[in-house]
Image (cartoon, helix red, strand yellow):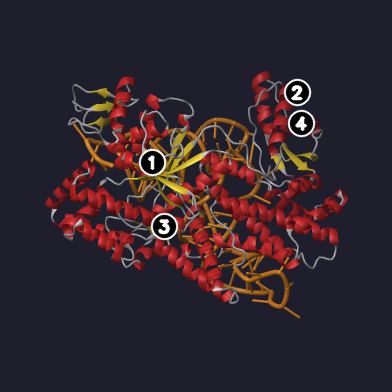
Amino acid sequence: MFPSFPSQSVKQYLIDLIRDRFDIALTDIASESPPRTSLGDLAFPVAFELAKRLKAATGEKHNPRQLASTLASALEQLPGLARVEVAGAGYLNVFFDRAALFREWICTAGSPPAAKPGKLIVEHTSINPNKAAHIGHVRNAVLGDTVVRMLRAAGETVEVHNYIDNTGVQVADVVVGFLYLEGRTPDVIKAIAESESRFDYYCWDLYARVGAWYEADKSRLDLRARTLHEIEADEGAAAEAGEFIAGRIVQAHLATMARLDISYELLARESEILHLHFWAHAFERLKQTGAIVYETEGRNRGCWVMPSEDASRNVEGEHDADKIIVRSNGTVTYTGKDIAYHLWKLGKLGLDFHYRPLAPDHRGNQVWVTTSRADQAVDPHPSFGNGTAFLNVIDVGQSYPQANVKRGVMAIDHDERVARSAHLAYEKVTLTPEAAAELGVELSDADAQRRQIGMSGRKGLGVKADDLIDRLEQNALAEVASRHPDLNGDVRKGIAQQIARAALRYFLLKFTRTSIIAFDFREALSFEGETGPYLQYSVVRARNIFRKLGRTPDQVLADLSDCSAEQIEAFFADEAGDDLWALASFAARLDETLAAAAANFEPTQVVKYAFQLAKQFNLFYHNHHILSEADAARKTLLLAMADLVRRQLERSLALLGIEAPERM
RNA sequence: GCCCCCGUAGCUCAGCGGAUAGAGCAUCUGCCUUCUAAGCAGAGGGCCGCUGGUUCGAGUCCAGCCGGGGGCACCA
């Protein structure tokens, strides 16, 4: 148990009360936070709803205010409440027993939530392994990683996958660049990787050059097709080069993500899905269940298609709503392969990968990667797959194929737990014209008129993740050095890294998933205002109070038993006491915030809560100089407040993948 | 043509059907001999795109429209 607001128990009591008194069955009732603390801790507009339901049931009109008043007198019997008031046109405002709740919050130490059944498989990052990661990829990874942290904190078992498309067009393009544009052999590519300090940056540039090279002579696209085929068949120099390049770039991506405290349990590679014939198995299943049908006539003649739920949408001359899974030439589409992969995720394929260990991650946890070679397989390995649902963090542009994948999987396994599977779609990161200019991009007139410019790996246009993190760390280091000249270099560097990580993660999470982020350097590089470092700073301030005091929070909290209920009551009594209570009770609302955020897969809700809590804490810090407080009991209570908020703030930050340094 | 997302302060964005719509940035004004000013306080700034509808109550739900972005392959 962590400190929490007892809104659920009050709500349930009201539901029962209404059922007994009025014979009206409400499954859930709305509650809200009153606009001011003086109006109470919880408000229920339930009397309005009740009046409506009573009128529908009996035909009689009821005054909401009167109903609220009836409910209020009954509700006051509930232990833990100080009083209940009726306000406005019929609001039921509940006031908690502050002294009792505060003592409870201070004493609840916190333990993990009860484990929920099943296993969620979260796939995120999944960057094409052919070039350095850019800020858009980082949004994906930070979002996915944060959702994983939230789900785990909410009691879910989560397995984290990073899908490696090592046999796709993008890898093929870089292979074409090395083999044909630059005329390298696989051995020379390996030598370049050794001599270049940033192989991923080299590939970034090369990929852009290949795009222009195709553009200059379209017949070169034949090389892409040939290379892609060789990679898929695992033959020749192209396959060797592709395997090497993808492997190296994946290492670079893992290193970049480690800087943001992001890691994975399994890297699932597309090459295995091909070589281990996942599709052949899935094909049989899909045919058996009738999920796909063979077309003998019409536009899709000779194809296996997944019929649209709504056949009327197949209009002559328009796009076909049926999704082709196997082409008339017998080859399978991406959607088909992805259905096979997702059937594996749910343990419904009847086939498994082989696994081999990769290096441990930055926290020392073993990372595994799939392999198609039985001789490379290492046993024992953790049990991968067999999930009850999958969650895919993929940008919103993939909504249509993702919907088709889920449809295909559900056709075979329509378990309600599987139905929880979802595409966690998020919008892209674009560049402001200013940011593009700073990257040295020449804008066309049309682009200059726009408010945002899309990033393009193909054009080499984008903010590289490591460049941005470097700048953040550099700026943070300069700030730390000026504030703490006494600290040694390594400590300063460590603090700067924590600050940089917080700034970037917070920046990417403060926008809701559906909001396009127009990347602006000034905003992203800021450490002031609504930023990650602001939150860290709040925690550091709270810790500094105890450091200066020379006692630990536990020692101080032991003193709390010396405080009488009357003293705590008095502490929260007057107008200033209302403000103190507002802070304490807001700090107790993390769990309900987390529950809502996890249910919506929306980290922004935690972000806004944490920022709000930090802001309120900073005001408290400013208004109450704790260490100079003369009244011993009051000082103890102020310290207890500071520690309660600090604990909840640190928990909130941990959900966001942010740690507060000891000093900053 | 169909589908999805967005439209809220000068800018960037929050806002579970509920009480007087908020924050950061920017502008202006105060506050460092104190537990760190990466901070705090204050001021100005809003037909919540438009029009209807549902509701005791709509920025929030529904319909239509306007504007911006994305999607609708025998590509991935």
Q: Please tell me which of labels 4 and 2 falls first in the chain.
A: 2
Q: Do the residues at pointers 3 and 1 share their chain? A: yes
Residue under circle 2?
A21
Q: Please tell me which of labels 1 and 2 falls first in the chain.
A: 2
Residue shown at 74%/30% (left/top)? A67
Query: In 3D space, how far apart are the residues under numbered discs 3 and 4 (Cα atoms)?
Result: 59 Å
Instruction: Give, as a three-letter code, the residue at label 3.
Output: Ala
Q: Quadrant of residue A56?
A: top right
State the SS at label 4. helix
Q: Quadrant of residue A630?
A: bottom right
Residue under circle 4?
A71
State the SS at label 3. helix
Residue shown at 32%/41% (left/top)? A375
Instruction: Give, as a three-letter code, the residue at label 1.
Output: Tyr
Could you say which disc has been placed on residue A255 in the image? Answer: 3
Instruction: Give, as a three-letter code, the residue at label 2.
Output: Arg
State the SS at label 1. strand
| Badge 4 vs badge 2, beta-carbon distance below 8 Å | yes
Q: Nearer the viewer, mark 3 or mark 2?
A: 3
Residue A660, percent across and down?
Answer: 59, 60
Residue under circle 1?
A355
Q: Quadrant of residue A133?
A: bottom left
The chain identifier of the residue carrying mark 3 reads A
A636 is higher (above) or lower (below) than A115: below
| Badge 3 vs badge 4, beta-carbon distance below 8 Å | no
